[in-house]
Image (cartoon, helix red, strand yellow):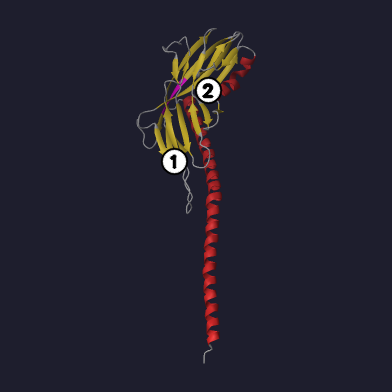
């Protein structure tokens, strides 16, 4: 014989146990969701920022190696092509929501950027040498974007909200003579062809370079003359020129200046005139797969 009161109590206890199990499961799901949300919103951006920062360090080393390779090719005059690798971007994290980073490598040829040496040296009718560059531009999602520029033999780094900085100086040497300051400048001038001057993405990019030719120009800069460097990165060039020639400017032998509202850096004679030996080294550059002879 079943007692009705006991059956009701048993059913009530089983129902409470079932409800507690559902509530426990919901609480576990909520806890897991909270943990995953914290990981996604807090830790994943930190991990990705660190990953992109490490990628920028890698690119810095790779671009520095590319500069060293171009300098070596210019010194040895080797026409054999050599490939240098640039890692364009970084991958996203698996299993989590994240965004990969991209990059672009290009050769920039803008007639507004140049070195001017009036009066024109012999063999250089216009008195102008183009200032071309190889550039890597990062498109990061978490870390600050950076651009690395190989221009005129120097390595420049720029961030969107900062001033450009010369990471490695161009090949400029000088001598203090009795009446003059002699400046020797090995200027890397990059040449390319349409279709082989740009690539972008997140994988590895190969840049093939080889020595093409060189020509040396001599000029004497008397009072009233000048050497002008037209560039987008005036602060970087100003920093570099002061580092290399600033002692002569302090003594009044030469003057280094960026005239107000001008887009060039100017070097002019002071108490001594300037003799310049400008060795323009043509380096042929191809970006991406394949090699065009």
The answer to whether residue 118 is left or right of residue 42 is: left
Task: Please tell me which residue lies in front, 16 or 263.
Answer: 16
Comparing 25 with 3, the one in front is 3
- Cα–Cα span, label 2 and label 1: 31 Å
- Identify the residue at image location x=50%, y=32%: 148
In this view, the residue farthest toward the front is: 5
Element type at marker 1?
Answer: strand
Which circle's residue, 2 or 1, is located before the other in the chain?
1
**Image quadrant containing the C terminus:** top left
Nearest the eye: 161 or 21: 21
Nearest to viewer (mark 2 / mark 1): 2
Q: Position of residue 145 (x, y in %)?
A: 51, 36
User: Dot 1, how many residues are within 10 Å of its Cα: few (below 14), some (14-19), or many (20+)?
Assistant: some
- Magenta stretch holds residue 146: no
Residue corresponding to mark 1? 204
Dot 2 alpha-carbon crowd within 10 angstroms: few under 14, some 14 to 19, many 20 or more? some
Image coords of residue 147 (percent x, y): 50, 33
> Residue 78 location, x and y as percent?
44, 27
Question: 75 or 55, which lies in front?
Answer: 55
Q: What numbered label is drawn on residue 150?
A: none
| Region rendered in magenta | 280-284
Is residue 209 in view from this perspective? no
Give the residue drawn at x 40%, y 33%.
198
Where residue 108 sits in the image (x, y, percent)? 43, 27
Instruction: Say the numbered circle drawn on residue 234.
Output: 2
**Magenta stretch containing residue 282, yes or no?**
yes
Q: Decide: is 244 above or below 20.
A: above
């Amino acid at each position: 014989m079943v007692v009705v009161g006991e059956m009701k109590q048993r059913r009530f206890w089983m129902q409470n146990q079932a409800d507690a199990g559902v509530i426990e499961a919901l609480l576990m799901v909520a806890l897991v969701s909270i943990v995953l949300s914290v990981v996604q919103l807090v830790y994943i951006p930190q991990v990705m920022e660190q990953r992109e920062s490490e990628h920028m360090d890698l690119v810095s080393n790779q671009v520095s190696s590319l500069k060293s390779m171009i300098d070596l090719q210019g010194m040895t005059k080797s026409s054999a092509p050599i490939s240098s690798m640039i890692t364009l971007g970084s991958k996203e994290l698996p299993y989590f929501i994240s965004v990969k980073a991209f990059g672009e490598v290009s050769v920039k040829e803008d007639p507004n950027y140049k070195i001017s040496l009036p009066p024109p040296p012999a063999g250089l009718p216009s008195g102008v040498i183009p200032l071309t560059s190889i550039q890597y531009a990062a498109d990061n999602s978490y870390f600050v974007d950076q651009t690395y520029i190989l221009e005129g033999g120097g390595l420049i780094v720029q961030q969107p909200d900062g001033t450009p900085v010369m990471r490695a100086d161009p090949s400029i040497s000088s001598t203090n003579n009795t009446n003059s300051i002699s400046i020797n400048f090995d200027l890397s001038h990059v040449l390319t062809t349409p279709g082989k001057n740009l690539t972008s993405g997140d994988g590895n990019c190969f840049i093939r370079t080889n020595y093409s030719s060189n020509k040396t120009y001599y000029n004497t800069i008397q009072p009233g003359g000048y050497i002008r460097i037209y560039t987008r990165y005036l602060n970087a060039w100003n920093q570099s020129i002061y580092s290399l020639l600033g002692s002569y400017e302090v003594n009044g032998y030469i003057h280094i200046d960026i005239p107000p509202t001008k887009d060039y850096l100017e070097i002019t004679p002071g108490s001594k005139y300037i003799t310049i030996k400008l060795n323009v080294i043509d380096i042929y550059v191809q970006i991406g797969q394949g090699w065009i002879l």
